[in-house]
Image (tube, helix red, strand yellow):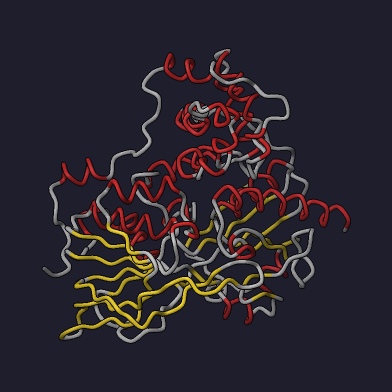
Amino acid sequence: MSILNNRLTNEQYEQNFSDIHPPFDSREAALVEANRCLFCYDAPCTKSCPTSIDVPKFIKQITTDNVKGSAFTILDANIMGGGCSKVCPVEKLCEGSCVFNLMDEPPIPIAKLQRYSTEKAIANKWPLFQRKPSVGRKVAVVGAGPAGLSCAHALSREGVDVTIYEKESKGGGLMTYGIAAYKVTPEFCEEEVEFITSLGGIDIIYGQELGRTISLPELQASYDAVYLGIGVGVARQLDIPGEELTGVEDAIRFIYDIRELGYPSVPVGDKVAVIGLGMTAIDAATQAKRLGASEVTIVYRRTQAEMPSTEVELNLAKLDGCNLIWLASPKEIKGENGRVTQLICNVMELGVPDTSGRRSPVETGKTITLDVDMVIKAAGQVPYEALVNTNQLTHWNGKVAIDSYCTTNIPGVFAGGDCVNGGKEVVDAVQAGKDGAKAILNFIQSE
Protein backbone atom coordinates (compact mmCIF):
# COMPACT_ATOMS: atom_id res chain seq x y z
CA MET A 1 0.00 0.00 0.00
CA SER A 2 1.09 3.59 -0.53
CA ILE A 3 1.00 6.62 1.72
CA LEU A 4 -2.62 7.65 2.16
CA ASN A 5 -4.64 9.96 4.37
CA ASN A 6 -8.16 9.52 5.75
CA ARG A 7 -7.58 5.80 6.38
CA LEU A 8 -10.00 5.54 9.30
CA THR A 9 -13.52 6.58 10.21
CA ASN A 10 -14.11 9.68 12.32
CA GLU A 11 -15.09 7.44 15.23
CA GLN A 12 -11.79 5.54 14.99
CA TYR A 13 -9.78 8.77 14.91
CA GLU A 14 -11.74 10.04 17.91
CA GLN A 15 -11.05 6.86 19.85
CA ASN A 16 -7.37 6.62 18.84
CA PHE A 17 -6.59 10.20 19.78
CA SER A 18 -8.69 10.51 22.93
CA ASP A 19 -7.06 11.61 26.19
CA ILE A 20 -4.45 9.02 27.14
CA HIS A 21 -4.42 10.15 30.79
CA PRO A 22 -8.08 10.87 31.66
CA PRO A 23 -8.72 13.26 34.57
CA PHE A 24 -10.39 12.24 37.82
CA ASP A 25 -14.04 11.46 37.15
CA SER A 26 -15.18 13.06 40.43
CA ARG A 27 -14.12 15.31 43.29
CA GLU A 28 -14.25 12.31 45.62
CA ALA A 29 -11.76 10.36 43.49
CA ALA A 30 -9.32 13.30 43.65
CA LEU A 31 -9.75 13.59 47.42
CA VAL A 32 -9.05 9.87 47.96
CA GLU A 33 -5.69 10.19 46.19
CA ALA A 34 -4.84 13.56 47.74
CA ASN A 35 -5.45 12.15 51.22
CA ARG A 36 -2.92 9.36 50.59
CA CYS A 37 -0.13 11.98 50.50
CA LEU A 38 2.21 11.94 53.52
CA PHE A 39 2.97 15.67 53.06
CA CYS A 40 6.68 15.00 53.50
CA TYR A 41 8.89 17.61 55.09
CA ASP A 42 11.66 18.56 52.64
CA ALA A 43 9.63 16.69 50.03
CA PRO A 44 11.62 14.82 47.35
CA CYS A 45 8.83 15.44 44.81
CA THR A 46 9.32 19.21 45.10
CA LYS A 47 13.11 18.84 44.88
CA SER A 48 12.82 16.84 41.66
CA CYS A 49 10.58 19.42 39.94
CA PRO A 50 12.67 21.80 37.79
CA THR A 51 10.23 24.61 38.66
CA SER A 52 10.13 23.67 42.40
CA ILE A 53 6.34 23.41 42.68
CA ASP A 54 5.45 22.94 46.37
CA VAL A 55 3.74 19.59 45.78
CA PRO A 56 2.71 18.77 49.38
CA LYS A 57 1.21 22.24 49.75
CA PHE A 58 -0.93 22.10 46.60
CA ILE A 59 -2.12 18.57 47.46
CA LYS A 60 -2.96 19.64 51.02
CA GLN A 61 -4.99 22.51 49.57
CA ILE A 62 -6.96 20.01 47.49
CA THR A 63 -7.79 17.98 50.62
CA THR A 64 -9.29 21.12 52.20
CA ASP A 65 -11.28 21.92 49.04
CA ASN A 66 -9.15 25.00 48.38
CA VAL A 67 -8.81 24.28 44.67
CA LYS A 68 -8.19 27.92 43.80
CA GLY A 69 -5.35 28.10 46.32
CA SER A 70 -3.99 24.83 44.98
CA ALA A 71 -3.99 26.18 41.41
CA PHE A 72 -2.20 29.34 42.58
CA THR A 73 0.52 27.29 44.33
CA ILE A 74 1.14 25.34 41.12
CA LEU A 75 0.91 28.18 38.61
CA ASP A 76 2.89 30.63 40.74
CA ALA A 77 5.85 28.26 40.38
CA ASN A 78 5.05 27.01 36.87
CA ILE A 79 2.70 29.13 34.77
CA MET A 80 2.40 26.19 32.34
CA GLY A 81 1.54 23.80 35.17
CA GLY A 82 -1.64 22.84 33.33
CA GLY A 83 0.17 21.63 30.23
CA CYS A 84 3.01 20.11 32.24
CA SER A 85 0.49 17.99 34.17
CA LYS A 86 -0.31 16.30 30.85
CA VAL A 87 3.11 16.02 29.17
CA CYS A 88 5.77 15.94 31.91
CA PRO A 89 7.71 12.65 32.25
CA VAL A 90 6.62 12.55 35.90
CA GLU A 91 7.87 8.99 36.28
CA LYS A 92 11.43 10.36 36.25
CA LEU A 93 10.60 13.59 38.10
CA CYS A 94 8.06 14.18 40.91
CA GLU A 95 6.21 10.84 40.89
CA GLY A 96 9.46 8.96 40.42
CA SER A 97 10.73 10.60 43.63
CA CYS A 98 7.61 9.87 45.70
CA VAL A 99 8.49 8.01 48.93
CA PHE A 100 5.75 5.48 48.23
CA ASN A 101 8.04 4.01 45.56
CA LEU A 102 10.31 2.89 48.42
CA MET A 103 7.38 1.11 50.06
CA ASP A 104 6.36 -0.84 46.95
CA GLU A 105 3.15 1.17 46.75
CA PRO A 106 1.89 3.26 43.83
CA PRO A 107 3.21 6.84 44.02
CA ILE A 108 0.81 9.71 44.58
CA PRO A 109 -0.63 10.62 41.11
CA ILE A 110 0.86 14.11 41.34
CA ALA A 111 0.31 14.97 37.66
CA LYS A 112 -3.35 13.98 37.81
CA LEU A 113 -3.89 16.05 40.96
CA GLN A 114 -2.04 18.96 39.37
CA ARG A 115 -4.33 18.65 36.37
CA TYR A 116 -7.37 18.57 38.68
CA SER A 117 -6.57 22.06 40.00
CA THR A 118 -5.08 23.76 36.95
CA GLU A 119 -7.77 22.67 34.50
CA LYS A 120 -10.41 24.29 36.70
CA ALA A 121 -8.38 27.49 36.90
CA ILE A 122 -7.85 27.67 33.14
CA ALA A 123 -11.39 26.64 32.17
CA ASN A 124 -12.95 29.13 34.63
CA LYS A 125 -10.39 31.85 33.79
CA TRP A 126 -9.66 32.47 37.47
CA PRO A 127 -7.69 35.74 37.81
CA LEU A 128 -5.05 34.28 40.13
CA PHE A 129 -2.38 36.90 39.46
CA GLN A 130 -2.36 40.67 39.59
CA ARG A 131 0.02 42.78 37.57
CA LYS A 132 1.99 45.53 39.25
CA PRO A 133 1.59 49.03 37.73
CA SER A 134 3.58 49.52 34.55
CA VAL A 135 7.18 50.59 35.23
CA GLY A 136 7.57 52.04 31.73
CA ARG A 137 10.12 49.48 30.53
CA LYS A 138 9.74 47.28 27.44
CA VAL A 139 11.13 43.83 26.70
CA ALA A 140 10.96 41.84 23.46
CA VAL A 141 10.65 38.06 23.70
CA VAL A 142 11.36 35.99 20.60
CA GLY A 143 9.30 32.79 20.65
CA ALA A 144 5.94 32.09 22.31
CA GLY A 145 6.97 28.65 23.51
CA PRO A 146 7.21 27.60 27.18
CA ALA A 147 10.43 29.57 27.84
CA GLY A 148 9.15 32.74 26.15
CA LEU A 149 5.69 32.63 27.74
CA SER A 150 7.14 31.91 31.18
CA CYS A 151 9.60 34.80 30.86
CA ALA A 152 6.89 37.16 29.58
CA HIS A 153 4.47 36.29 32.39
CA ALA A 154 7.11 36.74 35.12
CA LEU A 155 8.16 40.12 33.66
CA SER A 156 4.60 41.36 33.21
CA ARG A 157 3.75 40.53 36.83
CA GLU A 158 6.48 43.01 37.78
CA GLY A 159 5.02 45.76 35.58
CA VAL A 160 7.25 45.32 32.53
CA ASP A 161 5.52 45.62 29.13
CA VAL A 162 6.32 42.59 26.96
CA THR A 163 5.94 41.99 23.24
CA ILE A 164 6.38 38.39 22.04
CA TYR A 165 7.35 37.77 18.41
CA GLU A 166 6.21 34.30 17.28
CA LYS A 167 6.79 32.77 13.84
CA GLU A 168 3.76 30.43 13.97
CA SER A 169 0.09 31.39 13.95
CA LYS A 170 -0.45 30.15 17.53
CA GLY A 171 1.48 30.32 20.78
CA GLY A 172 2.64 27.42 22.91
CA GLY A 173 5.64 26.27 20.89
CA LEU A 174 6.40 22.60 21.45
CA MET A 175 3.23 22.19 23.53
CA THR A 176 1.07 23.28 20.61
CA TYR A 177 2.99 21.84 17.68
CA GLY A 178 5.38 19.12 18.82
CA ILE A 179 3.58 16.74 21.19
CA ALA A 180 1.19 13.88 20.44
CA ALA A 181 -2.44 14.96 20.20
CA TYR A 182 -3.63 12.28 22.63
CA LYS A 183 -1.50 13.86 25.38
CA VAL A 184 -2.66 17.44 25.01
CA THR A 185 -5.23 18.91 22.63
CA PRO A 186 -4.64 22.01 20.49
CA GLU A 187 -7.75 23.50 22.12
CA PHE A 188 -6.23 23.20 25.59
CA CYS A 189 -2.95 24.72 24.38
CA GLU A 190 -4.84 27.72 23.06
CA GLU A 191 -6.74 28.12 26.34
CA GLU A 192 -3.48 27.91 28.29
CA VAL A 193 -1.83 30.65 26.19
CA GLU A 194 -4.91 32.86 26.66
CA PHE A 195 -4.83 32.23 30.41
CA ILE A 196 -1.15 33.23 30.59
CA THR A 197 -1.65 36.44 28.58
CA SER A 198 -4.90 37.38 30.38
CA LEU A 199 -2.68 38.95 33.06
CA GLY A 200 -2.23 41.91 30.70
CA GLY A 201 0.91 43.65 29.54
CA ILE A 202 1.77 40.83 27.12
CA ASP A 203 1.23 41.27 23.38
CA ILE A 204 1.92 38.39 20.98
CA ILE A 205 2.58 39.26 17.35
CA TYR A 206 2.29 36.15 15.18
CA GLY A 207 3.96 35.42 11.86
CA GLN A 208 7.18 37.13 12.97
CA GLU A 209 10.40 35.15 12.49
CA LEU A 210 13.84 36.21 13.65
CA GLY A 211 16.12 36.65 10.66
CA ARG A 212 13.22 36.91 8.23
CA THR A 213 10.64 39.50 9.31
CA ILE A 214 12.44 40.90 12.36
CA SER A 215 16.11 41.39 13.20
CA LEU A 216 17.97 41.37 16.49
CA PRO A 217 19.41 44.91 15.99
CA GLU A 218 15.88 46.25 15.38
CA LEU A 219 14.64 44.67 18.62
CA GLN A 220 17.64 45.97 20.55
CA ALA A 221 16.96 49.47 19.28
CA SER A 222 13.27 49.36 20.28
CA TYR A 223 13.35 47.55 23.63
CA ASP A 224 15.21 47.73 26.93
CA ALA A 225 16.13 44.03 26.68
CA VAL A 226 15.59 41.03 24.41
CA TYR A 227 14.95 37.42 25.47
CA LEU A 228 15.56 34.64 22.94
CA GLY A 229 13.38 31.56 23.41
CA ILE A 230 13.63 30.27 19.83
CA GLY A 231 13.92 26.58 20.73
CA VAL A 232 15.35 24.01 18.34
CA GLY A 233 13.65 22.74 15.27
CA VAL A 234 15.97 21.71 12.52
CA ALA A 235 15.75 17.93 12.11
CA ARG A 236 19.00 16.02 12.37
CA GLN A 237 19.80 14.53 8.97
CA LEU A 238 20.65 10.85 8.68
CA ASP A 239 23.29 11.52 6.00
CA ILE A 240 22.57 8.25 4.21
CA PRO A 241 21.65 7.50 0.57
CA GLY A 242 17.94 7.76 -0.25
CA GLU A 243 17.08 10.42 2.28
CA GLU A 244 15.58 12.57 -0.48
CA LEU A 245 12.99 9.93 -1.53
CA THR A 246 9.27 10.62 -1.24
CA GLY A 247 8.02 9.01 1.94
CA VAL A 248 10.95 10.11 4.10
CA GLU A 249 9.52 12.49 6.70
CA ASP A 250 10.83 14.55 9.59
CA ALA A 251 9.12 13.49 12.86
CA ILE A 252 8.60 17.09 14.03
CA ARG A 253 6.96 17.98 10.71
CA PHE A 254 4.81 14.84 10.88
CA ILE A 255 3.59 15.70 14.38
CA TYR A 256 3.19 19.37 13.42
CA ASP A 257 0.93 18.43 10.51
CA ILE A 258 -1.24 16.22 12.73
CA ARG A 259 -1.69 19.15 15.12
CA GLU A 260 -2.22 21.76 12.42
CA LEU A 261 -4.19 19.89 9.74
CA GLY A 262 -6.14 17.33 11.78
CA TYR A 263 -5.91 13.53 11.80
CA PRO A 264 -7.73 12.64 8.54
CA SER A 265 -5.62 15.07 6.49
CA VAL A 266 -2.22 13.59 7.34
CA PRO A 267 -0.96 10.81 5.03
CA VAL A 268 0.65 7.77 6.63
CA GLY A 269 2.28 4.69 5.14
CA ASP A 270 1.11 1.13 5.63
CA LYS A 271 4.54 -0.08 6.78
CA VAL A 272 6.38 2.66 8.66
CA ALA A 273 9.89 2.76 10.11
CA VAL A 274 10.72 5.32 12.80
CA ILE A 275 14.41 6.06 13.41
CA GLY A 276 15.29 7.06 16.97
CA LEU A 277 13.88 6.42 20.43
CA GLY A 278 13.37 9.73 22.17
CA MET A 279 9.97 11.13 23.19
CA THR A 280 9.46 12.57 19.69
CA ALA A 281 10.17 9.17 18.11
CA ILE A 282 7.60 7.51 20.39
CA ASP A 283 5.03 10.22 19.61
CA ALA A 284 5.62 9.78 15.87
CA ALA A 285 5.46 5.98 16.02
CA THR A 286 2.31 5.76 18.13
CA GLN A 287 0.53 8.39 16.08
CA ALA A 288 1.46 6.67 12.81
CA LYS A 289 -0.17 3.52 14.22
CA ARG A 290 -3.21 5.47 15.36
CA LEU A 291 -3.53 7.10 11.93
CA GLY A 292 -3.96 3.65 10.39
CA ALA A 293 -0.50 2.21 9.64
CA SER A 294 -0.68 -1.58 9.86
CA GLU A 295 2.96 -1.99 10.86
CA VAL A 296 5.28 0.43 12.66
CA THR A 297 8.88 -0.49 13.48
CA ILE A 298 11.11 1.63 15.71
CA VAL A 299 14.82 1.33 14.87
CA TYR A 300 17.36 2.33 17.53
CA ARG A 301 21.13 2.08 17.26
CA ARG A 302 21.76 1.51 20.97
CA THR A 303 20.34 -0.72 23.72
CA GLN A 304 17.25 -0.25 25.86
CA ALA A 305 19.45 0.80 28.80
CA GLU A 306 20.58 3.85 26.81
CA MET A 307 17.29 4.97 25.29
CA PRO A 308 16.37 8.66 25.82
CA SER A 309 12.64 7.92 26.30
CA THR A 310 11.19 6.65 29.55
CA GLU A 311 9.94 3.14 30.25
CA VAL A 312 6.38 4.50 30.37
CA GLU A 313 6.70 5.94 26.86
CA LEU A 314 8.28 2.75 25.56
CA ASN A 315 5.42 0.70 26.98
CA LEU A 316 2.97 3.05 25.26
CA ALA A 317 4.56 2.20 21.90
CA LYS A 318 4.48 -1.51 22.71
CA LEU A 319 0.81 -1.36 23.72
CA ASP A 320 0.05 0.33 20.41
CA GLY A 321 1.65 -2.65 18.63
CA CYS A 322 4.88 -0.98 17.50
CA ASN A 323 7.82 -3.30 16.82
CA LEU A 324 11.30 -2.50 18.15
CA ILE A 325 14.68 -3.33 16.70
CA TRP A 326 17.62 -2.62 19.02
CA LEU A 327 21.22 -2.14 17.91
CA ALA A 328 20.36 -1.27 14.30
CA SER A 329 21.66 1.80 12.50
CA PRO A 330 20.19 3.11 9.20
CA LYS A 331 22.56 2.53 6.29
CA GLU A 332 20.49 3.26 3.18
CA ILE A 333 16.95 3.99 2.04
CA LYS A 334 16.00 2.36 -1.24
CA GLY A 335 13.13 3.25 -3.51
CA GLU A 336 11.39 2.78 -6.83
CA ASN A 337 10.07 5.60 -9.01
CA GLY A 338 11.21 8.10 -6.39
CA ARG A 339 9.27 6.47 -3.54
CA VAL A 340 10.56 4.62 -0.48
CA THR A 341 10.43 0.82 -0.63
CA GLN A 342 13.10 -0.40 1.79
CA LEU A 343 15.21 0.63 4.76
CA ILE A 344 18.54 -1.13 5.10
CA CYS A 345 20.19 -1.08 8.54
CA ASN A 346 23.58 -2.11 9.84
CA VAL A 347 23.38 -4.62 12.67
CA MET A 348 25.37 -3.23 15.60
CA GLU A 349 26.97 -4.74 18.68
CA LEU A 350 28.45 -3.16 21.77
CA GLY A 351 32.19 -2.53 21.45
CA VAL A 352 34.86 -2.49 24.11
CA PRO A 353 34.30 -0.11 27.05
CA ASP A 354 35.91 3.34 26.85
CA THR A 355 37.61 5.07 29.81
CA SER A 356 34.21 5.91 31.31
CA GLY A 357 33.06 2.30 31.00
CA ARG A 358 30.57 3.09 28.23
CA ARG A 359 30.39 0.65 25.34
CA SER A 360 29.54 2.33 22.05
CA PRO A 361 27.84 0.40 19.23
CA VAL A 362 30.05 -0.85 16.40
CA GLU A 363 29.06 -2.40 13.08
CA THR A 364 29.07 -6.18 12.78
CA GLY A 365 29.18 -6.23 8.99
CA LYS A 366 25.68 -7.68 8.83
CA THR A 367 22.58 -5.86 7.59
CA ILE A 368 18.82 -6.23 7.88
CA THR A 369 16.27 -5.04 5.33
CA LEU A 370 12.84 -3.69 6.18
CA ASP A 371 10.13 -3.38 3.51
CA VAL A 372 8.58 0.02 4.18
CA ASP A 373 6.70 2.74 2.36
CA MET A 374 7.43 5.50 4.89
CA VAL A 375 10.48 6.41 7.00
CA ILE A 376 10.12 8.93 9.84
CA LYS A 377 13.36 10.54 11.03
CA ALA A 378 13.38 11.14 14.78
CA ALA A 379 17.11 11.06 15.49
CA GLY A 380 16.95 14.36 17.33
CA GLN A 381 16.92 18.02 16.42
CA VAL A 382 19.78 20.42 15.94
CA PRO A 383 19.87 24.11 16.89
CA TYR A 384 19.44 26.98 14.46
CA GLU A 385 23.19 27.33 13.96
CA ALA A 386 22.98 29.55 10.86
CA LEU A 387 20.60 31.96 12.63
CA VAL A 388 22.81 32.08 15.70
CA ASN A 389 25.92 32.69 13.58
CA THR A 390 24.23 35.43 11.56
CA ASN A 391 23.41 37.29 14.76
CA GLN A 392 27.01 36.87 16.03
CA LEU A 393 25.91 35.07 19.17
CA THR A 394 28.52 32.96 20.92
CA HIS A 395 27.39 29.32 20.83
CA TRP A 396 28.39 25.69 21.32
CA ASN A 397 27.55 23.77 18.14
CA GLY A 398 24.57 26.04 17.61
CA LYS A 399 23.42 26.10 21.24
CA VAL A 400 23.41 29.71 22.45
CA ALA A 401 26.03 30.28 25.16
CA ILE A 402 24.84 32.14 28.27
CA ASP A 403 26.41 32.97 31.62
CA SER A 404 24.89 32.30 35.06
CA TYR A 405 22.69 35.39 34.55
CA CYS A 406 21.15 34.04 31.29
CA THR A 407 23.11 36.70 29.39
CA THR A 408 24.52 36.11 25.90
CA ASN A 409 27.72 37.72 24.63
CA ILE A 410 25.58 40.67 23.45
CA PRO A 411 24.71 43.09 26.29
CA GLY A 412 20.97 43.28 26.90
CA VAL A 413 20.26 40.06 25.00
CA PHE A 414 19.27 37.07 27.13
CA ALA A 415 18.37 33.48 26.17
CA GLY A 416 17.01 30.27 27.61
CA GLY A 417 15.19 27.02 26.97
CA ASP A 418 15.88 24.57 24.17
CA CYS A 419 18.01 27.03 22.15
CA VAL A 420 20.47 26.94 25.07
CA ASN A 421 20.16 23.37 26.41
CA GLY A 422 19.64 21.67 23.04
CA GLY A 423 16.22 20.27 23.90
CA LYS A 424 14.90 19.21 27.30
CA GLU A 425 11.41 18.98 28.83
CA VAL A 426 8.70 21.65 28.78
CA VAL A 427 9.13 22.13 32.53
CA ASP A 428 12.86 22.89 32.06
CA ALA A 429 11.98 25.59 29.51
CA VAL A 430 9.48 27.14 31.93
CA GLN A 431 12.17 27.39 34.62
CA ALA A 432 14.59 28.86 32.07
CA GLY A 433 11.99 31.56 31.33
CA LYS A 434 11.67 32.36 35.04
CA ASP A 435 15.46 32.59 35.37
CA GLY A 436 15.61 34.83 32.30
CA ALA A 437 12.94 37.17 33.68
CA LYS A 438 14.81 37.51 36.98
CA ALA A 439 18.04 38.34 35.13
CA ILE A 440 16.28 40.88 32.90
CA LEU A 441 14.68 42.60 35.90
CA ASN A 442 18.11 42.92 37.54
CA PHE A 443 19.53 44.27 34.27
CA ILE A 444 16.75 46.87 33.87
CA GLN A 445 17.02 48.00 37.49
CA SER A 446 20.82 48.26 37.34
CA GLU A 447 20.52 50.59 34.38
Q: Is residue 395 above or below residue 13?
A: below
Q: Is residue 193 visible?
A: no
Q: How many marks?
A: 0
Judge left or right: residue 396 versus residue 83: right
Name the residue nearer the viewer: 269 or 222: 269
Quarter residue 133 falls in = top right
Quadrant of image for the C terminus: bottom right
Name the residue nearer the viewer: 406 or 2: 2
Quarter residue 402 falls in = bottom right
Q: Residue at 14% across / 70% down in the picture?
A: 2
Name the residue nearer the viewer: 302 or 18: 302
Where's residue 389, x and y in %?
A: 63, 81
Where's residue 305, x and y in %?
A: 48, 57
Q: Is residue 431 above or below residue 2?
A: above
Q: Is residue 15 visible?
A: yes
Where's residue 385, x and y in %?
A: 58, 77
Quarter residue 132 falls in = top right
Judge left or right: residue 70 versus residue 89: right
Where's residue 172, x and y in %?
A: 49, 51
Q: Residue at 46% across / 20% down in the picture?
A: 30
The outermost residue toward the front is 352
Quadrant of image for the N terminus: bottom left
